[in-house]
């Protein structure tokens, strides 16, 4: 046992169930905020999830929300909700430092589209959460809320940790490879990395497979945050934005699920594999068909299609970020970590035709996923190759380090632009492990209905 | 006669024909630059095309290029080419003021992807060219190089004017609605607005139909600038980038052209219409079939598909820029022109479903264009509804002003994401009028071969 996570006893912070009290006057957004600040005060010295807190601004916003509820006119179901924003994303009242000394104090006084939408919905932008350097590998100071010797995951390290620590009910993260779902799994979050383009990335349009996602203590809060952003800010330019309804759909029991092995399978630790197989057993016991790669040549073709997702991510993102890394290297080479610089060195070798070739491989992977769309209601997999590794005991390979855990189970949904939702359904060695479901593009709402069924009906698997 | 443009006598500045002299040592990039600076010194007081000139930096870069030619090792066919950059686009050594007082002195010390690529190819980033406010309607101080009482067009006002004035051989512009092709036509440029996504827009990914384009004094320089950018910086994230070869293809005589009337047709002034019909007569005389909307129900369907392109542009761009305009309005309302602010007011009325509906209309327009792909080698049309209007005599309608000319002939290629090339094939009242050809997406290189045939074989039409 290296951690303190007990799925039966863990009670993350939720917001939707506080709203009736706001309406009735037995509770207020200001009081809710003060409770959050109390948890932050108690736990932040060890968890270190926040880069910046705007307590004064949050209190003013909470008082305004309190007045709106008193007047019977809240702006949305998330009016008064304290939210953390990953420190890659612009906020007009706080710096955006991107986990890099190069951006110390950087503040263009603009709100990213999603942040603007959250404010318009009445949410309280409480602070900025720690990210790894530019959302890539070099980690920040955050620790896992269930054991400070372990990583919270990355790159949305702080956004995952603030949920695991019960500091706020929701936080915004971003994922290019595995930066929402993996840390969310490590920290017992509910989290969604929606369909590519579903949530407006504002100023952050530079990758063709990055996403804004939502970390939360409950599926309802998670969905409502995503929904309220999309309604006000839309999706990315040219994309239709998140489809669904304002309320999450009722739970739907899946008839059939496809297990995704991906590049993660051979890297699984034994305890996590045992736990996942036990979970699949519980699903079968509940009458759900479980299809494996040996059950259909289409599933085998899908596994082959996504079988080099990590390399696709590396090359797509390397080429796409080359020019901005070159800018930073020219300005201040010593302000970049060796890990980031090694990505630039790799990307410099790429030609335009190399990039076109990897886009084609990505397109082939997407076709292989579309081809299994009719086989089952969703794909099921793990959110990581095991529980959060120790922060002081990381394998470092040739320059590209993975000090916040391996994204081998996460790269496929990023490559596919497919919605993925992680559910805290396992505990391994006293640390959380997430189980993810993945659906076809734009099927975010029906996917959540399946995730809801799992959360409501399948008791978490605990492995020592 | 209100202008001084004589197509027979006009000699724009070209670069490719200077390169042999650089190689042979009879000329140098430094001497070429000094000749450009001489023209700028003579004409800039009236034309007012530049926001910033980095003469010292340009001289250093020209000396470095001179040394490379001396060593027999130029970096590319555009090594040593002085280029102007529209002042919406980041340059690490000059501010990027975007035609707005809100961005006075703004300098994040980064090169946009295309600028970085140009430097890597040896081009000399000479200065920043005037743009209308944020590339939208409120004009800057630039005058038409053929008559200072007239507009140079916009929003790439300076990039078009520097070519018309013979100050530099090439300049970078941007087009969301009509901001490359229209001003280029007003200023007797050769210019390309390539396929959507073909040239990396760097930090400017916020619109789903904006493009970087190239203004030049010759088709060869135009193409080589575009090519060298794409080879080094690629296209937009997720796009394959500009297709073709390093050299422009030899001229190809089209067998058949479709005339596009668009929303511009009823707005044409009589002299321009007469001139265009005379031009079509010359094409027919040369043996080229000219198809009109009455010749095929497919062409009629295409005209209907693009028949509300201006409204599509307004609504697509309105929704997409709403969040960033809200940021600026919140920070400094009085720093925004009424023209820009009125766009925000319109956009605030849009819901996410309104945006989805206009994306669908855009998709229908694209289908209607794809459906005529087999009918002819290209589409031909005008680049504007007439010559550049007087700068002091502009109709202003409800809030959205068009003080740099109407983009009615330009909105279709922006909506379609289709490549468009303008050729200086007409003079009306002593001012240039461009004729544009438009092709299917990714057909930039074959489209240029057709534009080359027109430029080489059709004498410009002159109307008094």
Image (cartoon, coloured by chain):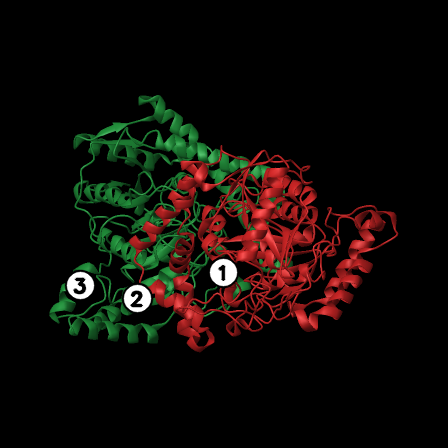
Chain colours: A red, B green
Residue designated by label 2: B120
In the rendered structure, the residue with mark 3 lies on which chain? B
Could you tell me which secondary element the residue under label 1 belongs to? Answer: loop
Q: Residue at x 31, y 22 (%)?
A: B295
Residue A329, numbered label: none
Q: Earlier in the sequence, mark 3 or mark 2?
A: 3
Residue designated by label 1: A406
Both on one chain, marks 3 and 1?
no
Residue designated by label 3: B18
Q: Position of residue B422 (x, y in %)?
A: 30, 45
Indicate left or right for B3 with A183 as reference: left
Could you tell me which secondary element the residue under label 2 belongs to? Answer: helix
User: Mark 2 or 1, which is nearer the eye?
Assistant: 1
Both on one chain, marks 3 and 2?
yes
The alpha-carbon separation of the residues under discs 3 and 1 comes to 54 Å
**Quarter of the rendering containing residue A62:** bottom right
Indicate left or right for A346 with B98 as reference: left
User: Mark 3 or 1, which is nearer the eye?
Assistant: 1
Q: Position of residue A282 (x, y in %)?
A: 62, 42
User: Does residue A72 lie above or below A125 as drawn?
Assistant: above
Towards the viewer: B49 or A152: A152
């Amino acid at each position: 046992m290296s951690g303190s996570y007990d799925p039966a006893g863990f009670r993350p912070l939720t917001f939707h169930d506080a709203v009736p009290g706001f309406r009735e006057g037995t509770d207020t957004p200001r009081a809710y905020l003060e409770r959050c600040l109390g948890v932050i005060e108690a736990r932040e010295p060890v968890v270190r999830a926040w880069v910046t807190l705007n307590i004064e601004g949050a209190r003013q916003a909470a008082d305004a929300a309190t007045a709106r509820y008193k007047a019977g006119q809240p702006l949305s179901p998330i009016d008064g909700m304290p939210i953390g924003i990953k420190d890659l994303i612009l906020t007009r009242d706080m710096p955006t430092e991107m986990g890099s000394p190069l951006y110390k104090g950087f503040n263009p006084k603009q709100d990213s589209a999603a942040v603007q939408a959250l404010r318009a919905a009445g949410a309280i932008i409480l602070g900025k959460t720690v990210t790894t350097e530019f959302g890539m590998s070099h980690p920040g100071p955050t620790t896992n809320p269930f054991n400070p010797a372990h990583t919270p995951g990355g790159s949305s390290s702080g956004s995952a940790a603030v949920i695991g620590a019960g500091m706020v009910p929701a936080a915004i993260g971003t994922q290019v490879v595995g930066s929402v779902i993996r840390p969310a799994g490590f920290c017992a979050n509910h989290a969604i990395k929606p369909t590519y383009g579903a949530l407006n990335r504002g100023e952050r349009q530079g990758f063709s497979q990055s996403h804004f996602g939502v970390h939360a203590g409950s599926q309802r809060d998670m969905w409502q945050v995503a929904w309220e952003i999309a309604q006000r800010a839309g999706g990315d330019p040219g994309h239709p934005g998140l489809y669904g309804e304002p309320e999450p759909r009722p739970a739907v029991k899946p008839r059939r699920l496809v297990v995704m092995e991906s590049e993660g399978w051979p890297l699984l630790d034994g305890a996590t594999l045992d736990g996942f197989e036990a979970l699949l057993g519980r699903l079968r016991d509940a009458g759900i068909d479980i299809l494996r790669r040996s059950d259909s040549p289409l599933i085998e073709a899908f596994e082959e299609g996504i079988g080099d997702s990590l390399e696709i991510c590396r090359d797509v993102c390397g080429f796409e970020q080359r020019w901005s890394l070159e800018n930073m290297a020219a300005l201040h080479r010593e302000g970049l970590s060796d890990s980031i610089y090694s990505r630039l060195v790799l990307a410099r070798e790429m030609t335009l035709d190399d990039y076109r070739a990897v886009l084609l491989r990505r397109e082939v992977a997407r076709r292989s996923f579309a081809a299994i769309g009719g086989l089952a209601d969703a794909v099921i997999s793990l959110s990581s190759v095991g529980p959060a590794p120790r922060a002081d005991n990381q394998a470092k390979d040739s320059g590209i380090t993975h000090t916040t855990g391996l994204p081998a189970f996460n790269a496929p949904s990023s490559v596919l632009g497919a919605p993925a939702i992680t559910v805290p359904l396992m505990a391994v060695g006293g640390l959380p492990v997430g189980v993810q479901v993945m659906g076809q593009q734009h099927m975010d709402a029906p996917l959540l209905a399946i995730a809801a069924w799992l959360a409501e009906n399948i008791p978490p698997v605990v492995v020592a």
